[in-house]
């Protein structure tokens, strides 16, 4: 048995408000991610002082969580690694992650070498503007280990939608209605 940690403690500066609790098709973004992760493994939500509404949602929905020091992304991931050992990480703002995406990373992860989830640029829908590094779109699904780092190619093109801005949220709403995922149960 492994562990999936949904990173939900960021400041959401580009959005201007706490992202994990923003709704897409009537459902909080965190619940979209949690619903997919829960089907694969044990799940823990990592919060910080920056996300009090997300903490309230976790309590209401009975989702297990841990509060990190909230000093920054790298520091919090290192703290989580020190506390829990190797884990699969997902950001709370990739609402179209699927259980199969989590399974793929879990299968590839040896528990030692970190994996950064990426999409080949030709799989990225044209309307999306992902973070690009070394010819790949970086997505918010990774494996965190103690040594080294490698890329892991994923297939789901909607992982390229990282909801960071109000415009991204509007696009996610349109996509959710097109793909019919708003009926997904947790």
Image (cartoon, rainbow, N blue to C red):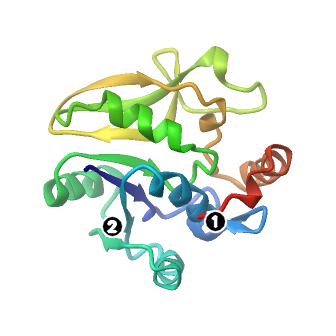
The answer to which image quadrant residue 65 occupies is: bottom left
Asked if residue 140 can be seen in this view, the reply is no
Whole-angstrom CA distance, mark 2 to mark 1, is 17 Å
User: Number of labelled discs?
Assistant: 2
Residue appearing at x 84%, y 51% in the figure:
177
Between 160 and 32, the one lying in front of the other is 32
Q: Is residue 95 left or right of residue 125?
A: left
The residue indicated by pointer 1 is 16
Q: Give SS at disc 2.
A: loop
The answer to which image quadrant residue 182 occupies is: bottom right
Q: Is residue 180 above or below residue 122?
A: below
Residue appearing at x 69%, y 58% in the figure:
184
Mark 2 packing: few (<14 Cα in 10 Å), some, or many (20+)?
many
Asked if residue 94 can be seen in this view, the reply is yes
Q: Measuring from the top left, give residue 68's x and y in whole percent.
A: 29, 68
Tag 2–tag 1 contact (CB < 8 Å): no
Q: Give SS at disc 1.
A: loop
Residue appearing at x 57%, y 53% in the figure:
93
The residue indicated by pointer 2 is 70
The answer to which image quadrant residue 24 occupies is: bottom right
Q: Measuring from the top left, give residue 7's x and y in whole percent.
A: 41, 57
Q: Mark number for residue 93?
A: none
Residue appearing at x 42%, y 65% in the figure:
9
Q: Measuring from the top left, give residue 127's x and y in whole percent.
A: 78, 31
Mark 1 packing: few (<14 Cα in 10 Å), some, or many (20+)?
few
Q: Measuring from the top left, give residue 157's x and y in whole percent.
A: 65, 29
Quadrant in which the C terminus is drawn = bottom right
Badge 2 or badge 1: first in the primary sequence: 1
């Amino acid at each position: 048995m492994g562990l999936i940690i949904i990173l939900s403690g960021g400041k959401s500066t580009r959005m201007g408000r706490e992202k994990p609790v923003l709704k897409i098709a009537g459902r909080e973004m965190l619940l979209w991610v949690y619903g997919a992760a829960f089907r694969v493994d044990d799940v823990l939500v990592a919060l910080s002082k920056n996300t009090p509404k997300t903490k309230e949602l976790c309590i209401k929905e009975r989702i297990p969580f841990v509060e990190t020091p909230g000093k920054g992304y790298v520091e919090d991931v290192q703290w989580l690694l020190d506390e829990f050992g190797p884990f699969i990480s997902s950001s709370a703002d990739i609402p179209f992650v699927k259980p199969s995406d989590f399974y793929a990373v879990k299968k590839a992860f040896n528990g030692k070498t970190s994996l950064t989830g990426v999409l080949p640029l030709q799989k990225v829908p044209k309307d999306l503007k992902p973070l690009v590094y070394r010819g790949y779109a970086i997505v918010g699904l990774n494996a965190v280990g103690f040594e080294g780092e490698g890329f892991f190619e994923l297939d789901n093109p909607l992982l390229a939608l990282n909801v960071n801005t109000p415009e991204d949220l509007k696009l996610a709403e349109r996509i959710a209605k097109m793909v019919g995922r708003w009926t997904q149960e947790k």
